[in-house]
Image (cartoon, rainbow, N blue to C red):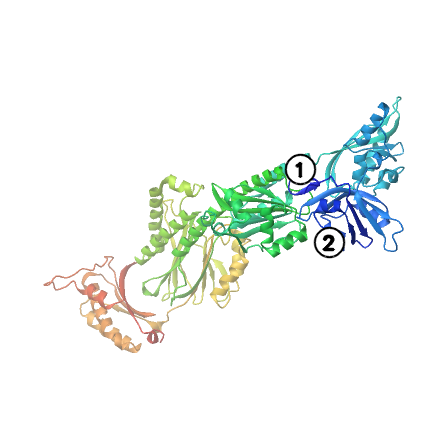
């Protein structure tokens, strides 16, 4: 292409060959194509004759040219054409209607020759001033005292797109009755009225040009010797470069405020695309490496391997991003040796035009890509690698098609600056995603997978991690089977977020399970847990906590409840945790009035337990504060919403859980949410049998006999021998080593439970008897014939218990 100067991004300016000539029919079909036209645009005559002239336009004709075409008048203006290699060619042309061309009508399109130069001879000294004004590269026009056009130089005539004789005697508003010429006309009249110069700035498209410019105008009065205003002059300066410089600074500032508002990889990529499209590009696509989207460490880009990326975000000035050939969220592969791979390997951004061999190869490698480039007339492309901390994260594509100016070096510097800022935010989001996934996996591994099958109650629960604006927290919950068919329910919340909070949660949950196996009362268990939290805090020290959280707080909250299906009583204690909600079988909802207790980790303050009797079919709702509290809503409002959601529970607990989570939380949760629902059952008298025994060795035989008879009544005669052995050993120990009162209880639940209670608080010890010892073998025998056994403290002493498995068909029989 030697017919003009190639500007940055692939636009050719000016220098139309003198023999440029094209004949176009009135219907818009090309009828003749000269050698000058071939030299300018690269097409042979056979390629274009018979085609529509609009196919060669890279932008719509200026409105002055369209107006004159419609009127059948000669026109002259700037025209944007498309070269055969895809580059934009901006030239100044004129169209002349041919007379006597027949009914069809023909137009001759040639290069524009300013009328002011026609017929000039060498000027004398007095005429040099007139020639200077006429040929001044700054557009200048003169108006009389009636604000009517008098004369203009070549530059002004070119941007107005009308011949001088057509404008003479008209006001500016009559010449161009459209915005912003109404404002210019008003300013000119102001100058004529006041006699003072006016400065005005405007960004817009002149009637005779194909693209907008930034104009700075000086409208000055023309005064005589007496100071009388005889007219005015309008001098217009093209300040497009300064305009774009200011706009780039504004875009950079906006990008700094917009990008990185969240720790979400996809949202950060979308913020980058949005900032660029709003500022200086017509289409932006952000492709992140697959590993980055997943939060993993990105693999290095290798010259011998294709690169798999994912279209993470894309924005366009056109609705729906029609320029894109890859849908958002879909993977895309950069083959070996292609332009995107080479750009990633260099680590530097670059500008391209469609005629560049590298970009042409990339475009033509995909028919869909080639089609969209041609359809949308994409004329300027930038590719900038997304890199942070020496690691390549992806590639950002910037395209222009609506904006006439191609990308220049300043645009590339701007793109690299924005992408560099976004890359740090993307990398932070990637690291956060990885840590959050690790913490979430750790947390889920430490929480129960499914509700346990319990005869005492039906349990359902939900765990909802916080949204992307916060780290994973330390919420936990559990349902623990206890001896005597009892069940312990626990819900807790560790202060803080992240892996440290999840790990602390796991340690506390393990401790609660261990203490529950010892069968501690709720208030005693919280006291032991409080000591553990203090000890953990001392072991870790402030330097460990400082790396994980900056709140300055330590500790946790917890609620622990033990339900006995035989007595239907529930003992509950809480450590700074929200109170549970109780829904009675008739649908009434109330929050249990329990002593609040201090949060775990403060030390030295007591915990109190309360006991409530529950009707069979009652519903207990335990939860963490993430369910009821948000930054813009107080806790009382959350409790009210929870009460309303529980007032009409569904038949299935799972459905009730979903109903609560749909209606109670306000928007995306800022903290983890745990909800655990438990519907109570009761063991009726037919499944429990109790005997009071005297402290007399003779009572052992009677206890053994009564137990055998009860097993026969339950249809469990096959379990009589091991049960009688357990009863004999436990009652013997109670008579020999314990205190009154002595009680024997059999419970037929999912297992057969045998319990012997006495008034002594001395804990039993399992030991091996020596060969000649007469005793010491009782608990060893109990341990051998039972599935599990243990002891627990009671308000009046202790209880030793043993469980035996039962066949499914007998455990279900009343």
The spot of residue 436 in percent (x, y) is: 45, 50
Quarter of the image for residue 173 reads: top right
Q: Is residue 594 left or right of residue 335?
A: left
The spot of residue 341 in percent (x, y) is: 52, 48
Residue in the picture at 74% in, 36% down: 215
Q: Is residue 227 left or right of residue 563?
A: right
Q: Which mark is residue 244?
A: 1
Question: In the rendered view of the protein, which quadrant contains the C terminus?
Answer: bottom left
Q: Are marks 1 and 2 in contact (CB under 8 Å)?
A: no
- Above-or-below relation of 634 to 801: above
Q: Is residue 632 visible from the viewing direction of this image?
A: no
Residue in the picture at 42% in, 54% down: 441
Q: Which residue is mark 2?
A: 46
Q: Decide which of 575, 437 is in the foreground and name it.
A: 437
The spot of residue 519 in percent (x, y) is: 31, 58
Q: Decide which of 83, 278 is in the foreground and name it.
A: 83
Residue in the picture at 66% in, 52% down: 374
Query: What crowding class fits label 2: few (fewer than 14 Cα within 10 Å), some (14-19), or many (20 or more)?
Result: few
- Above-or-below relation of 725 to 594: below
């Amino acid at each position: 292409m030697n017919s003009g100067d190639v500007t940055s991004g692939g636009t050719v300016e000016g220098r139309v060959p003198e023999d440029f000539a094209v004949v176009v029919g009135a219907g818009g079909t090309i009828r003749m194509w000269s050698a000058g036209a071939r030299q300018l645009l690269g097409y042979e005559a056979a390629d274009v004759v018979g085609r529509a002239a609009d196919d060669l336009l890279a932008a719509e004709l200026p409105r002055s040219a369209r107006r004159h075409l419609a009127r059948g008048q000669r026109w002259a203006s700037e025209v944007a054409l498309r070269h055969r290699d895809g580059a934009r060619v901006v030239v100044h042309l004129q169209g002349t209607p041919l007379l006597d061309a027949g009914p069809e009508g023909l137009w001759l399109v040639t290069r524009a020759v300013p009328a002011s130069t026609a017929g000039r001879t060498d000027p004398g000294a007095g005429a040099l001033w007139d020639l200077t004004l006429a040929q001044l590269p700054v557009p200048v026009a003169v108006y009389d005292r009636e604000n009517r056009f008098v004369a203009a130089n070549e530059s002004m005539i070119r941007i107005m797109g009308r011949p001088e004789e057509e404008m003479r005697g008209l006001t500016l508003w009559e010449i161009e009755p459209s915005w912003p010429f109404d404002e210019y006309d008003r300013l000119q009249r102001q100058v004529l009225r006041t006699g003072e110069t006016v400065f005005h700035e405007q960004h817009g498209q002149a009637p005779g040009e194909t693209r907008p410019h930034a104009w700075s105008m000086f409208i000055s009065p023309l005064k005589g010797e007496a100071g009388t205003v005889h007219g005015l002059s309008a001098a217009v300066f093209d300040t497009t470069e300064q305009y774009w410089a200011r706009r780039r600074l504004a875009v950079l500032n906006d990008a700094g405020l917009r990008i990185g508002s969240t720790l979400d990889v996809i949202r950060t990529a979308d913020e980058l695309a949005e900032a660029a499209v709003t500022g200086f590009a017509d289409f932006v696509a952000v492709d992140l490496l697959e590993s980055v989207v997943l939060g993993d460490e990105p693999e290095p880009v290798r010259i011998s391997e294709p690169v798999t990326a994912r279209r993470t975000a894309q924005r366009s000035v056109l609705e729906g991003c029609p320029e894109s050939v890859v849908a958002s969220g879909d993977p895309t592969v950069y083959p070996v040796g292609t332009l995107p791979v080479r750009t990633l390997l260099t680590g530097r951004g670059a500008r391209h035009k469609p005629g560049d061999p590298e970009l042409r190869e990339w475009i033509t490698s995909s028919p869909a890509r080639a089609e969209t480039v041609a359809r949308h007339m994409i004329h300027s492309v930038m590719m900038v690698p997304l890199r942070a901390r020496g690691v390549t994260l992806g590639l950002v594509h910037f395209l222009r098609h609506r904006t006439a100016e191609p990308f220049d070096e300043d645009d590339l510097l701007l793109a690299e600056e924005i992408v560099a800022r976004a890359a740090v935010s993307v990398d932070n989001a990637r690291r956060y995603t990885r840590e959050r996934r690790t913490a979430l996996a750790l947390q889920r591994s430490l929480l129960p997978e499914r509700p346990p099958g319990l005869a005492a109650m039906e349990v359902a629960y939900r765990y909802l991690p916080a949204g992307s604006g916060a780290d994973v927290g330390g919420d936990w919950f559990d349902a623990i089977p206890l001896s005597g068919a009892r069940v312990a329910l626990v819900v807790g919340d560790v202060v803080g977020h992240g892996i440290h909070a999840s790990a602390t949660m796991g340690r506390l949950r393990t401790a609660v399970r261990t203490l529950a196996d010892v069968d501690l009362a709720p208030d005693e268990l919280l006291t032991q847990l409080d000591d553990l939290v203090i000890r953990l805090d001392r072991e870790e020290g402030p330097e460990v906590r400082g790396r994980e959280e900056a709140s300055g707080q330590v500790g946790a909250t917890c609620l622990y409840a033990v339900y006995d299906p035989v007595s239907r009583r529930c003992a509950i204690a809480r450590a700074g945790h929200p109170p549970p909600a109780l829904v009675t079988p008739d649908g009434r909802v109330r929050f249990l009035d329990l002593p609040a207790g201090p949060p775990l980790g403060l030390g030295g303050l007591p915990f109190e337990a309360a006991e409530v009797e529950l009707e069979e079919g009652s519903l207990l709702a335990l939860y963490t504060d993430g369910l009821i509290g948000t930054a813009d809503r107080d806790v009382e409002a959350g409790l009210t919403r929870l009460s309303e959601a529980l007032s009409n529970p569904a038949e299935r607990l799972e459905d009730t859980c979903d109903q609560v989570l749909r209606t109670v939380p306000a928007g995306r949760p800022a903290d983890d949410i745990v909800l655990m629902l438990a519907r109570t059952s009761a063991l009726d008298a037919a499944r429990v049998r109790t005997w009071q025994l005297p402290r007399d060795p003779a009572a052992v035989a009677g206890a053994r006999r009564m137990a055998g008879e009860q097993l026969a009544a339950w249809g469990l005669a096959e379990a009589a021998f091991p049960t009688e052995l357990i009863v004999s050993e436990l009652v013997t120990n109670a008579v020999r080593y314990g205190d009154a009162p002595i009680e024997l209880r059999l419970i037929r639940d999912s297992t057969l439970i045998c319990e012997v209670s006495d008034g002594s608080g001395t804990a039993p010890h399992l030991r091996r008897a020596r060969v000649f010892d007469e005793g010491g073998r009782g608990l060893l025998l109990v341990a051998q014939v039972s599935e599990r056994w243990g002891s627990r403290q009671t308000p009046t002493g202790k209880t030793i218990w043993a469980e035996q498995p039962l066949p499914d068909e007998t455990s279900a029989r009343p």
